[in-house]
Image: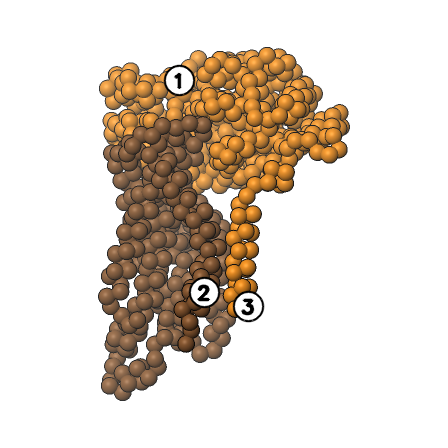
Amino acid sequence: MKRRIFATVLSSLMIAMAFAGCGKDAGSDNSKPAAGSNNSGKIELEFFQQQGEEAIQAGYEAIIADFQKENPDIVIKQNTVPDSLKVLASRIATDDIPPLLTDWPTQMQFKEKVKNGYYEKLTGQEFFSQVNEDYLAMTPADDGEYYAMPYARNYMAVFYNMDMFEENGIEIPTTWDEFIAVCDTFKEKGITPLNFPLKDGVGHIFQATTVAFVPDGVEELVEVQEGKTTLSENAEYKADFSGYADKMMKLMEYGNEDAFGMSTTMMQESFANGNCAMIISGSYGRGNILLANPDMRFGAFALPGDTVDSTTCLTGVNAALCVSAQASEEEKEAAFTFLNYISQTEVAQKWSDESGEPSIIAGTEYADENFAPILNFIDEKGQVHDWMASTLQNNVVNELYNTVQSFLLDKPSTDQFLKNMDDTIAASVQ
Amino acid sequence: MKSKRESTADKLTNFLFTIPAVVLYSIFFIYAVIVGVNYSFTDWNGIAKTYNYIGFENYKSLFENQYFWNTLWVTVKYALLLVVGVMITSLILALCLNSIKHLKTLTKSIFFIPAMIGGVTISLIFDQIYYRLVPVIGEMLGISALSQSPLASAKTALIAVVFVNVWQAVAMPTMIFMAGLQTVPGDLYESAMLDGATTFQRFRYITLPYLMPTFTINMVLTIKAGITSFDYAYALTAGGPSRSTTVIGISIYNDAFNNMKFSLANAEAVILFIIIALLSLIQIKISSKGGVN
């Protein structure tokens, strides 16, 4: 009998513990890294920073440390997690939005968050006067208001080994023909001109090459997405993307034989070790290359189109800073204080120097002179295009990556490629 | 003899013992399944605060989508290859390990090591082996098929991914088979040997029937692992090249988190659930007809 009583009590206890574990005590929630006021009168803010690169995290840590010296009552705690977009989506689903965070304001997923009222409207804030107007113009939400402070930009470009270029007397090419001539020269000298990381899919290389080879290509794809036409039927679009297909096939002739087994990281490592003269990379790749070979001299230039005038560079706003609409007034005030602080030229310059990211705050200069060709091109020429996700649906872009990868791998006819692109968009569009 | 009252009290005690497990199972599994099924009938994108019920639209669009059928076919191929690879390898390993006379525990422990390493970790190691080592071996042996990473070709990528999965997945079925081998009475082998049975005949008519229940367990577990597999393909190829390794797990993940089609991803998960349930039922039905219980 005693045993039964003991068993009954034990069972009840286990049930109670299970419920206690699942329950949420508002006063003792330790799951969040930091939020709200603490007993010492200080306010703690979680800063959910979505870029995992070590240099970027270090850049933010440096300016946060300086900020706290000037604002001892505001404690900013940077929190960076792997797969941050997924984590953020889960946190949003459970009404646990970090009070201060980064996000990509030109992407459709950001606009969806704005539409649902998750982000605080920032229009009219003082710090916007410090932000480069061209990039700021990329960021309004569908209602025309601003919900994020852009802080840095990114771009896709041709990264080139400066020593190889100098040793072989090669100048930076500015047109497609010049670019092919450079590739031919390297090939003749036994140097692999390009490395492609096609194991990860065509990814950003598809975006960069589309913008470079078909300046209106993204807009044409948007029309196909909207069901207005198809690449196979529209004569102009057919010519544009047939030309794109030819150029991609030509580029592959200068690439590595193991392209479909090479990941992006492997490509960066291969480039850093001098196995090729050039790669098509995002600005985010610079840090990894320097990590693999800190002494390497490399720079970047715009992937050339047919002519200098038609050459267009893919560039966009990097993760921008947002404030949660669900944050308390106190937290919002602290977040605005932080945003005003980091929008100062000298603070942004320090962040840029530490992180290696090109800032878009007025008065800042990019420290690495080797990247002047690409940054000057973007700033002076103004022939730029935003990332596809700002106008094309995410799933359409992702499926097009696969279709272009199949094209490069299986080499179907150009007509078949165009049909596959049309079918992919039709099957993926929501 | 127990009184009726005592018997009822015993039953109540036993019932109470099951409550913690039932409650936890209900909260973390049954509730989650119900919510998931519910979302599969909506148009929720994973971010919006509201959603609409759209009936079977998600299921309809899935069945009309060529990529979904491709994903299902890849998943079936993956599961079949995994089952064949794991069952044959683990059975051979179990028979070999069972016949070892010395250092049996140490050897078993060594063969169990892969099961203790994470799938993603193993995938990353094999990614490097495929990329750096395989082409060197191919060149040395003059085999052109191995001149590049097997992950680089749509024809070989799935086999290469399943190989990594098999490499890790054999450990547990091997242990289960070894446990099953302990149930075979030794005197049966002696009688069979006296009757002049060959090694194969002893395996076919004594070992195999006794192993059938174990076979069923391993088969069900491996089929389930194959159909729900995600980490190996995702870490090694992310579904490529040319969608040749896009198993349904990757499709669900991409639709839920990359494509903002959360409700569609739930519909895919429901279909996956139905497939696993059906396969498990068929498997148990077929396997229960033979063997020694």
Name the residue tied to disc 1. A215
Residue at 48 percent across and 55 percent down: it is B20
Quadrant in the rendering for residue A368: top right
Do dots 2 and 1 share one subunit? no
Name the residue tied to disc 2. B9
Query: What amino acid is labelled 1 in the image?
Result: Pro
Question: For chain A, what colour was chosen?
Answer: orange
Q: Return the x and y of residue B135 as percentages of the image width and height.
A: 41, 50
Query: What amino acid is labelled 2 in the image?
Result: Ala
Output the chain of dot 1. Answer: A
Q: Number of marks in the image?
A: 3
The Cα atoms of the two marked residues, 2 and 3, are separated by 12 Å
Q: Return the x and y of residue B11 as percentages of the image width and height.
A: 42, 64
Name the residue tied to disc 3. A2
Residue at 28 percent across and 56 percent down: it is B281
Do dots 2 and 3 share one subunit? no
Residue at 45 percent across and 18 percent down: it is A385
Q: Is residue A198 left or right of residue A370?
A: left
